[in-house]
């Protein structure tokens, strides 16, 4: 029996009754809620979808998978009417529409609800105002806005989805995970109206494990009550846990799919990558599950970075070190302080206490530029806000960290820059329709790969990463892990924060667990079971536990 089957059935037993709701067959089970036939979409002659068929049964969760640039977001946007497909038909709850004529208004009227990757929220507005932009503001007979009513309603929804923010909070003050939860809650706000299909484009990309599980449980509960859901994801665990059907896209066509219970992970990976790229299903599954060898030099490391008694809300007296050639993971729930640690080391957040050193000398960066000068670089979580120059081309984005090397006196060596960019994109398996197009036209995962690649080429002494493989497909993820191990093997220290515990277990030499600003565990992934790691992350008390090689766990 494949892993998917086992875990799938296990989930049906393990979802808590409160989360899963009362089980009853979906009202629309057996009917087709959403179908697409022969969808075709090209961008400036380059095909993104080449005749895609999709059939989604009512009351089911249908996972949509595919490698970076395979066409998932384009398909979702064509269904949403954000893009008009060039050809094909879309049938929504039995209503047939030529795909060319689908507009956002028609898609909505027909019963589709979307949460896109860019969430569609406004940082400068309050959470309540963001809800109201979608559903409208309640007004009194004189057309004044009934703020109290709006806030009460939104606070009720936030409580319902266990989102720890208030309706009056400014959206910009929320963490990315909280913003995603707000967008999901907003899309589901009118879920009591039955005939809706909810389409979510990587809703858990920036969510920590507990939040993502909560969301998955909530989605499963909705599906059990008849809600139809299409879920775009790169995370196999989510498919295992909640999906009923899976469709796999590759290069703009449907590469395969079927009921999740009958489909193994290895088969899905084969569909994603093309059988010719894999050495057979069993080999692929084993490769995905087998950690790659540790970075060279592990075991004989010299201290590189040390932080002592670091404080800055929510951090409290945090001590940590990263050795030369070591990959250290930072695990913790959203709000535990993971990003604050990284930003403090990068000079983007001032500490209120403690001290840092790099190679034995004080490390007191007054700004990110200062940190970069001393060899510390940071790949942040939110690439749209913090990392990518969206209006610039792929070439400029890829060269931004090393631009000086192409200038000789006042002349720019464009040919050298172009050649190196082509090589960089090939090395990092970036799929781009040329290097001169704006980076915003790349798929999300390919943007992430370009940003990571450009920092790696600076050959930093200490590399800080926040959610490095968010939105990156499974095969590219392994390429990224390989790049990180290579750079560690050259003596770079790597500190990586991730909400994906499997990622940390596979990638890191050591994992530090942060709970509410305290480091509560220093774990050796080779000796720590997955459940012990998860338990440490969820720990409510701050008693430090040190589970290194000399103190093995049974977890
Ligand atoms: N607005 C656009 N202009 C030009 N090309 C685009 C545009 N949007 C998508 N593409 C191209 O269409 C192809 C499919 O991209 P899409 O974003 O649908 O992939 P995806 O499967 O969602 O990838 P990811 O997992 O990385 O988000 C890619 O080659 C991409 O570069």
Image: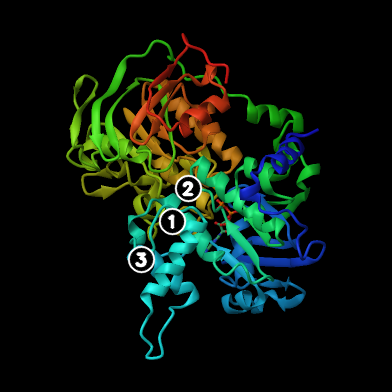
Around disc 3, counting alpha carbons within 10 Å, would you say few (fewer than 14), some (14 to 19), or many (20 or more)?
Answer: many
* Relative side of 552 to 344, left or right: right
Query: Of circles 3 and 2, which is in front?
Result: 3
Q: Which residue is mark 2?
A: 206
Judge by depth and name the residue closer to the eye, 267 or 411: 267
> Residue at horizontal 49%, vertical 30%?
504
Q: Position of residue 441 (x, y in %)?
A: 49, 59
Q: Is residue 199 left or right of residue 89?
A: left
Q: Which mark is residue 179?
A: 1
Which label's residue is closer to the chain start, 2 or 1? Answer: 1
- Element at label 3: loop
Query: In the picture, residue 300 is in which quadrant?
Result: top left
Could you say which quadrant of the image residue 312 lies in? top left
Circles 2 and 1, Cβ within 8 Å, touching? The answer is: yes
Neighbor class of circle 1 (other Cα within 10 Å; few <14, some 14-19, many 20+) is many
Q: Name the residue located 42 percent from the left edge and 43 percent from the top edge.
A: 334
Q: Is residue 522 visible?
A: yes
Across and down, in percent, residue 335 comes to 38, 43
Q: Nearer the viewer, mark 2 or mark 1?
A: 1
Q: Mark 3 sits on what residue? A: 126
Quarter that holds the N terminus? top right
Tell me, yes or no, if residue 363 can be seen here. Answer: no
Tell me what residue is drawn at x 36 percent, y 49 percent.
414
């Amino acid at each position: 029996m494949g892993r998917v089957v086992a875990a799938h059935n296990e989930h049906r037993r393990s979802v808590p009754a409160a989360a899963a709701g009362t089980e009853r067959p979906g009202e629309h089970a057996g009917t087709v809620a959403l179908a697409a036939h022969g969808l075709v979409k090209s961008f400036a002659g380059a095909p993104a979808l080449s005749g895609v068929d999709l059939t989604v049964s009512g009351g089911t969760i249908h996972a949509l998978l595919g490698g970076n640039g395979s066409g998932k977001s384009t398909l979702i946007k064509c269904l949403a009417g954000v893009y008009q497909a060039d050809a094909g038909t879309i049938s929504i709850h039995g209503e047939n529409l030529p795909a060319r004529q689908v507009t956002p208004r028609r898609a909505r009227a027909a019963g589709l609800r979307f949460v896109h990757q860019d969430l569609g929220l406004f940082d400068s507005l309050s959470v309540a105002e963001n809800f109201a932009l979608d559903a409208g503001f309640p007004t009194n007979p004189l057309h004044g806005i009934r703020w109290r009513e709006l806030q009460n309603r939104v606070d009720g929804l936030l409580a319902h989805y266990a989102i720890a923010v208030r309706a009056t909070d400014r959206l910009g003050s929320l963490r990315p995970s909280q913003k995603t939860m707000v967008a999901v809650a907003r899309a589901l706000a009118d879920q009591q109206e039955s005939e809706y299909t909810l389409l979510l484009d990587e809703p858990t990309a920036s969510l920590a494990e507990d939040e993502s599980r909560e969301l998955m449980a909530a989605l499963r509960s909705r599906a059990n009550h008849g809600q139809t859901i299409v879920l775009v994801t790169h995370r196999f665990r989510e498919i295992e846990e909640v999906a009923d059907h899976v469709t796999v896209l590759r290069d703009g066509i449907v590469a395969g799919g079927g009921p999740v219970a009958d489909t193994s992970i290895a088969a899905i990976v084969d569909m994603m990558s093309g059988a010719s790229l894999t050495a057979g299903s069993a080999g692929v599954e084993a490769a995905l599950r087998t950690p790659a060898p540790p970075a060279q030099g592990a075991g004989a490391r010299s201290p590189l970075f040390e932080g002592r008694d670091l404080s800055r809300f929510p951090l409290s007296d945090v001590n940590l070190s990263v050795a030369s050639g070591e990959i250290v993971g930072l695990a913790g729930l959203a709000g535990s302080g993971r990003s604050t640690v990284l930003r403090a080391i990068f000079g983007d957040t001032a500490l209120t206490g403690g001290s840092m050193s790099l190679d034995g000398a004080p490390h007191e960066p007054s700004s990110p530029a200062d940190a970069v000068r001393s060899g510390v670089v940071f790949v942040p979580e939110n690439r749209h806000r913090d990392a990518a120059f969206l209006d610039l081309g792929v070439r400029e984005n890829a060269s931004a960290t090393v631009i000086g090397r192409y200038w000789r006196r006042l002349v720019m060596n464009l040919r050298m820059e172009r050649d190196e960019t082509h090589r960089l994109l090939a090395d990092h398996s970036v799929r781009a329709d040329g290097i001169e197009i704006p980076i915003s036209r790349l798929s999300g995962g390919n943007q992430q790969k370009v940003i990571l690649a450009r920092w790696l080429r600076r050959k930093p002494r200490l590399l800080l990463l926040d959610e490095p493989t968010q939105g990156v497909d499974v095969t590219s993820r392994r390429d990224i892990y390989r790049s990180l191990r290579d750079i560690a093997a050259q003596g770079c220290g790597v500190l990586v924060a991730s909400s994906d515990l499997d990622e940390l277990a596979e990638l890191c030499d050591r994992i530090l667990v942060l709970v509410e600003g305290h480091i509560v565990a220093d774990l050796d992934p080779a000796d720590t079971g997955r459940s012990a790691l998860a338990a440490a992350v969820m720990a409510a008390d701050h008693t430090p536990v040190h589970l290194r090689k000399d103190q093995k766990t049974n977890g």
